[in-house]
Every structure is written in C-alpha cells, then in structure tokens.
Amino acid sequence: MVDFDVVSLPETDHVAEGDTAPDFTRPLVNDEYWEDRALADAVDGPTLLLFHPMDGAFQGTYLYNTVDDHGWAADVDVLGVSISTPYAHKRLLADRGDGVRVFSDPGAGVIEEYGLAHDIDGMTGVTESRPAVFLLDADRTVEYAWVADEHPAFPDAEAIDDAVADLVD
C-alpha cells in the first residue's frame, strides 16, 4: 500500500461560479487525432471542463475513471486540460475517458490563467494543474466549480452528477 501525505495548497484566485471561462487555443486531442482548437469553438452546449495533473498521475486516472463510471460524456461534452503532450493524451484516451477530448497545455499558460498552477515539489521548473472541475453552459458561464485545496484531493462525483442534472434538465 502506498502512503500519501496530504498537503494543503495555497489559496488561489481561480475561475469561480458565475465567471465566464477564459477562452484559449491549444491542441485538442480525441481518440483519433488532434488539432488546434479554441475553447469557445469547442463549447456549444453544456460542457464539463476538467483540469488534472500530468497524464499518468493517479489523480488524472481517477478523474477519467469517474467520468466513465458516471457516464457524464453521455449528457455533456467533457473536455480535459493538462500539461501533458498530445501523444500522452492519446495513450490516456486509449484506456479511459470514452467520448472525452483533452487540451494539451505543456507550457501551463491556460492552467495559470485559470488560477490552477501548482509547482511540483522536487521538480524545479515543472508546473502542473491542481485538480479542478468546471461545468460550463453554452455561453461558457461557470455553473459549478470545484478546485482542490489540498493534494491529493478528488471532486465529489455526486455533486457533479447533481450539477450536470440541473444544467441539462
């Protein structure tokens, strides 16, 4: 059994409920290919925008397993964002995240703009995203937001279920 210490993360001025999710353009990866895509062009209805640490980290694996377990991609578009490359996203999507597409943000610019940057202990110069979930309406207004305040932390899947149901009903 692996033993993890829970570490409190510093407060951050992140995107919150009622805000308009900032637009950005990055490579958007699906199970077949990737292309540069703006968030504004990718959001055309209710969208779950998931930020996670690099692919392969257990938080990302857990998050996409939860997407599959709860069937969110059947009700809303599901878009992820991490610092991993499009190649890593292709490997991730081959195993989990049915119907999910993931933006590649290796320079962490989007992650910083959303107020989610987290410097990795022991890895100088490497920034990743703290886990976060934003449920957007068709105009990119944030209807639900959860941002980790400790590491590791995981979103409340039932709260996301309720938020999705409220938005699509």
Image (cartoon, helix red, strand yellow):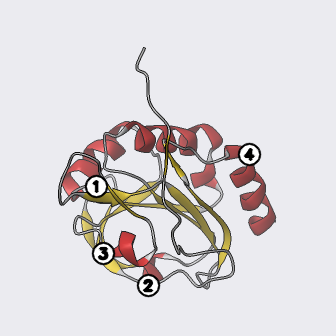
Q: Kindly report which numbered mark, 4 or 1, lies closer to the viewer in this rendering.
A: 4
Which quadrant holds residue 101? bottom left
Quadrant assignment for the C terminus: bottom right
Q: Is residue 35 left or right of residue 117?
A: left
Give the amino acid type for the residue marked by disc 3 in the picture.
Gly
| Residue occupied by mark 4 | 158
Horizontal and vertical percent position of residue 80: 43, 59
First reached walking from the N terminus: tag 4 or tag 2: 2
First reached walking from the N terminus: tag 4 or tag 1: 1
Q: Kindly report which numbered mark, 2 or 1, lies closer to the viewer in this rendering.
A: 2
In-front residue for pair 128/98 = 128
Residue in the picture at 29% in, 68% down: 108
SS label for mark 3: helix
Marks 1 and 4: in contact by CB < 8 Å? no
Horizontal and vertical percent position of residue 61: 42, 39
First reached walking from the N terminus: tag 3 or tag 4: 3
Mark 4–mark 1 distance (CA, rounded to whole Å): 31 Å
Which quadrant holds residue 91? top left
Mark 2–mark 3 distance (CA, rounded to whole Å): 12 Å
**Location of residue 120 with respect to 11 vertically, above or below:** above
Horizontal and vertical percent position of residue 22: 47, 83
SS label for mark 2: loop
Mark 3–mark 1 distance (CA, rounded to whole Å): 25 Å
Q: Kindly report which numbered mark, 2 or 3, lies closer to the viewer in this rendering.
A: 3
| Residue occupied by mark 2 | 23
Q: Is residue 35 left or right of residue 48?
A: left
| Residue occupied by mark 3 | 109
**Location of residue 31 with respect to 45 vertically, above or below:** above
Give the amino acid type for the residue marked by disc 1 in the picture.
Glu
Residue in the picture at 52% in, 77% down: 43
Give the amino acid type for the residue marked by disc 4 in the picture.
Glu
| Residue occupied by mark 1 | 32
